[in-house]
Amino acid sequence: MLTWMIISILLISGLLILVYDQWGLKGIAYSRTFSKQRIFEHESLDMVEVISNAKLLPLPWLRLESSMPVALRFGEQDNLGVSEGNIYQNHVSLFHLRSYRQITRRHRLTCVRRGHYSLETATMTGGDPLGLSSKAKQFTLNLKLLVYPQILAIPELPLPNHSWLGNLAVRRWIVEDPFLIQGTRAFRSGDTLRSVNWKATARTGSLQVHQRGYTADHRLMICLNVESAESMWRTILEPERIELGIRYAVSVAAYALENGIETGMLCNGWVQGRERDSVRIGPSGHAGQQEWLLETMAGLILERTVSMVKLLEEEVELGTTDMDYLIISCHRGEKLQEVVRKLEQLGNGVEWMDIPELPGKPGQEAPPAHEGGNA
């Protein structure tokens, strides 16, 4: 009797293994979506999973695994295990699925760091009721999420004393219009030779320049310096401090654009998914400028391309005039101040926004690029 019982158990177990190994994961469909494709730091969204079983055979247990960036934080939830590393976290969930059923599961995520994130695959494992065998299947997701840097309120920014930013909403910007000439005037310190009116100079016997009219147009170039010191090389030593500078940059840009100021961005880092060149986005006030600046800063890799001195020297070589530069930096090195004086001599305005020191371990290197994970 005992022998027949053992034989029966073995036969049933073997049959279950055969059935579930052959048909267990057939007819199983899985999809994953985000409730939003674009979001700001520290905001939340839902990750929605839909799993369906389009056959008669029920699934007594399923295990779903995927690797996700640690910057996407899960809330407390049953049947969900999350093990975190420095960059990625392994997301594991267990459930069962009856025949011809579909289930929808929602996970609340909070995005704690900016970045371009990609979730490529998820792996599902299932098996027989006794757990004697299992089989895995990989699902392609190709899921993208763009997390913008957090925009801070203007009072939270370390604005320079008497900064035009603090009074932007009520101030009417007046700069010279190079195409509107209303006569001549005597040469003054700061005037360039190209503005000299040579006929009037010859007639009066003293140096005369074109008297230009004025316009309310205004241009702002935000310069984000990823260097923590003038002597720094490629590796970013204070990443969290630069992250704060990124928030400063997008906050000023948003505020300026909302007030009708043409705004651009200059940065000596490079952007994920683009050429490894420094960032230069010319000032513009068109409708898509803010989104383009946010997307660029979301994908900024904390790795220095060239010195900020080099970038500003290129601005000097271009002969840029009538531009306001806001330099967001951890330092005001001697070479940096020297090139700033050259910009001012060309008729540009320059202001500084210092990135304060943060408590923490000095010498900490920047994390790798913000990229998605695979299962």
Image (cartoon, helix red, strand yellow):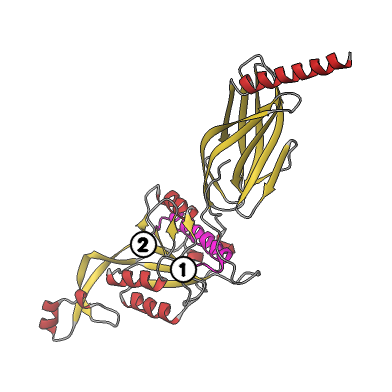
- Residue 67's place in the image compared with 305, above or below, is above
- Residue 29's place in the image compared with 302, above or below, is above
Evaluate whether residue 163 shows in this view: no
The single residue placed furthest to the bottom in the displayed view is 205
Which of the 4 image quadrants contains residue 80?
top right
> Which quadrant does the N terminus fall into?
top right
Q: Front-most of 189 and 26?
A: 26
- Magenta-colored stretch includes residue 240: yes
Q: Front-most of 188 and 248?
A: 248
Crowdedness of circle 1 by 10 Å Cα count: few (<14), some, many (20+)? some
Q: Nearer the viewer, mark 2 or mark 1?
A: 1
The single residue placed furthest to the front in the displayed view is 3
Q: Front-most of 170 and 257?
A: 257
Q: Is residue 54 left or right of residue 322?
A: right
Crowdedness of circle 2 by 10 Å Cα count: few (<14), some, many (20+)? many
Residue assigned mark 2: 218
- Which of marks 1 and 2 precedes in the sequence? 2
Inter-mark Cα distance, 2 to 1:
34 Å
At 16% from the left and 76% from the top, the residue drawn is 197
Residue assigned mark 1: 234
- Magenta-colored stretch includes residue 237: yes
Q: Is residue 128 left or right of residue 185?
A: right
At 32% from the left and 74% from the top, the residue drawn is 347
* x then y, percent, for residue 361: 64, 70
Evaluate whether residue 349 shows in this view: yes
* x then y, percent, for residue 310: 36, 72
Q: Amino acid at mark 1?
A: Arg
* x then y, percent, for residue 75: 70, 43
> Which quadrant does the C terminus fall into?
top right
Element assignment for label 1: loop
Element assignment for label 2: loop
